[in-house]
């Protein structure tokens, strides 16, 4: 398991390339909240958007996640804890005013990037509206 890549995976790089080409800037593999030890794949700080690109095996994708046949006493609780931790992370971030976007590694990077771009632009407009005392358009 130590050989598993924690960041800069192919799906992540594909999405990052599209977002960067669209003019968005972000932090990579960064904790959205200082008090949180968990890290998001992409963090858009001022817009408060955290993006997670989840691996099908490690996060138990309903389409592609499969349970290993060997050592199931280890893997079943491990994968269950991963799902529970994901849900807890989402809950904490939402409570702090963040928008959480989760994508699966098998999703089309163009579609994921489009979702992220739309969300970041919407959140930026909302933040600007609050700063100037008006409602966002």
Image (spheres, helix red, strand yellow):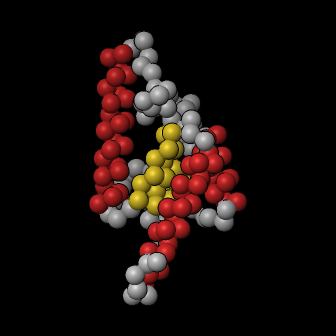
Residue depicted at x 51% and y 35% = 55
Residue with the most extreme front position: 137
Q: Nearer the viewer, residue 130 or 75?
A: 130
Q: In the displayed structure, would residue 97 be above or below residue 9? A: below
Side (left or right) of 25 relative to 53: right
Q: Quadrant of residue 127?
A: bottom left
Is residue 83 in sight in this rendering? yes
Number of callouts: 0
Q: In the displayed structure, would residue 129 be above or below residue 13? A: below
Q: Quadrant of residue 78?
A: top left
Residue 125 at x, y percent in the picture: 49, 75
Residue with the most extreme right position: 21
Residue depicted at x 36% and y 16% = 72
Q: Nearer the viewer, residue 59 or 61?
A: 61
Q: Nearer the viewer, residue 82 or 62?
A: 62
Q: In the displayed structure, would residue 20 be above or below residue 71? A: below
Q: In the displayed structure, would residue 63 be above or below residue 88? A: above
Side (left or right) of 127 relative to 8: left
Q: Nearer the viewer, residue 129 or 88?
A: 129
Residue 50 at x, y percent in the picture: 46, 56
Residue depicted at x 31% and y 26% = 77
Residue depicted at x 66% and y 66% = 23
Residue 87 at x, y percent in the picture: 32, 44
Residue 130 at x, y percent in the picture: 40, 81
Is residue 27 in sight in this rendering? no
């Amino acid at each position: 398991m130590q050989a598993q890549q924690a960041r800069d995976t192919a799906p992540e790089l594909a999405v990052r390339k599209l977002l960067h080409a669209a003019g968005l800037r972000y932090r990579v593999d960064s904790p959205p909240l200082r008090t949180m030890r968990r890290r998001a794949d992409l963090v858009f700080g001022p817009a408060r958007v955290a993006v997670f690109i989840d691996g099908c095996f490690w996060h138990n994708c309903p389409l592609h996640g499969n349970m290993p046949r060997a050592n199931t006493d280890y893997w079943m609780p491990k994968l269950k804890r991963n799902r529970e931790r994901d849900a807890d992370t989402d809950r904490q971030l939402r409570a702090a005013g963040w928008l959480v976007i989760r994508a699966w590694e098998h999703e089309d990077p163009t579609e994921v990037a489009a979702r992220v771009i739309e969300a970041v632009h919407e959140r930026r407009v909302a933040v600007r509206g609050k700063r100037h005392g008006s409602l966002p358009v």
